[in-house]
Amino acid sequence: MTDLALFTHVLGAMVLVGGLLTGASALAFARGDARFLRLGYWTLLAVALPGFLVMRIGAEWIYSEQGWDDLPGEEEPTWLGIGWATADLGGLILLLSLAVGGAGVYRLRSGKGAVLLTVTLALAFVLLAAYVVTAWAMAGKPE
Amino acid sequence: MSLDDWVLALHVLSAFVLVAGMVVFWVLAFAPSDGAAGTIAQVGNAAAGVGSVGTLAFGIWLALSVGGYDLWDGWIVGAFVLWAIGVGTGMRSGAAFARGRRERAVALHALSSVAVLLVLADMIWKPGA
């Protein structure tokens, strides 16, 4: 069961990173084209967010399967701490970027909203950088 | 972290970059083909290229360097075969996409994605190891 939990966790994380890269690319290269601004936003909502949820469910599953929840907090390894921090803080930033981007997409109807979607783009880049560091930490497991 | 730990981290990061490139093309399959699509496809091509070379190169390093694994282990040979299918069909998909043959491109991309998904499963379960 641990392998299935790990597969779920890694697959979700890969889809999350893929959704962030695609969404950020569409927002970055749209050059004001509303179709691609919407594509970027909807990619974050329909690809990155489900990826995040699957990754997070997989993380909880492994955590209980491997008995990490039985360890005192101070004995938790660094890589696990990095994983929790970026998953939880990253989830909040993802939700914030989706809320801001949702308002931006809504305002595209009246020809506005580009600034809000630029904020969403910036947050997506921050998340992308954070998750690259997280993937490195989870795989390399520094002390 | 030892050198092997660093190589493992780069191997996993390469896999993330490869799958990210594949996600780019899944989204583009349902997007307009004009405007920014070409530039976004370049991002996908770069990610898929870097990711596929990285997974293979760092994977070979790990198979040779980490004790208990050999290049001819069944699950590693299986990964090479699936990797070759995934990359080969992915490249054909990209060519079909560039020629505007979207249905063929999506079919090949689906095949490529299944192959890469099987590589991921193979890497985690390591059957026979």
Image: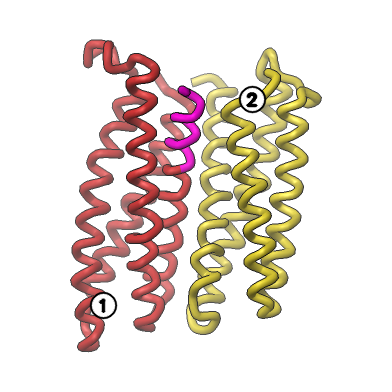
Which residue lies at the image location 36% right of the left edge and 51% below the top edge? A50
Above or below, B13 against A104 in this view is above
Q: Chain of mark 1?
A: A
Give the main secondary structure, helix, strand or loop, of the magenta stretch: helix
Which residue lies at the image location 37% right of the left edge and 60% below the top edge? A46
Classify residue B57 by image quadrant: top right
Please indicate whether residue A73 sits to the left or right of residue A126 in the image. left
Magenta span: A1-11
Amino acid type of the residue that numbered disc 1 sits on in the rendered structure: Ala
The location of residue A27, given as percent across then percent down, is: 37, 70
The location of residue A3, given as percent across then percent down, is: 51, 26
Please indicate whether residue A93 sits to the left or right of residue B10 in the image. left
Task: Identify residue for label 1.
Answer: A114
Q: Chain of mark 2?
A: B
Please indicate whether residue A26 sits to the left or right of residue A97 in the image. right
Density class for disc 1 (Cα within 10 Å; few <14, some 14-19, many ≥20) is many
Q: Which color was chain A given?
A: red
Classify residue A89 by image quadrant: top left
Which residue lies at the image location 24% right of the left edge and 65% below the top edge? A119
Q: Which color was chain B given?
A: yellow
The location of residue A79, given as percent across then percent down, is: 37, 25
Secondary structure beneath label 2 = loop
Above or below, B119 against B114 in this view is above
Task: Identify residue for label 2.
Answer: B126
Taking depth in this image into account, of B18 and B46 the one nearest to the observer is B18
Residue B88 is labelled as none
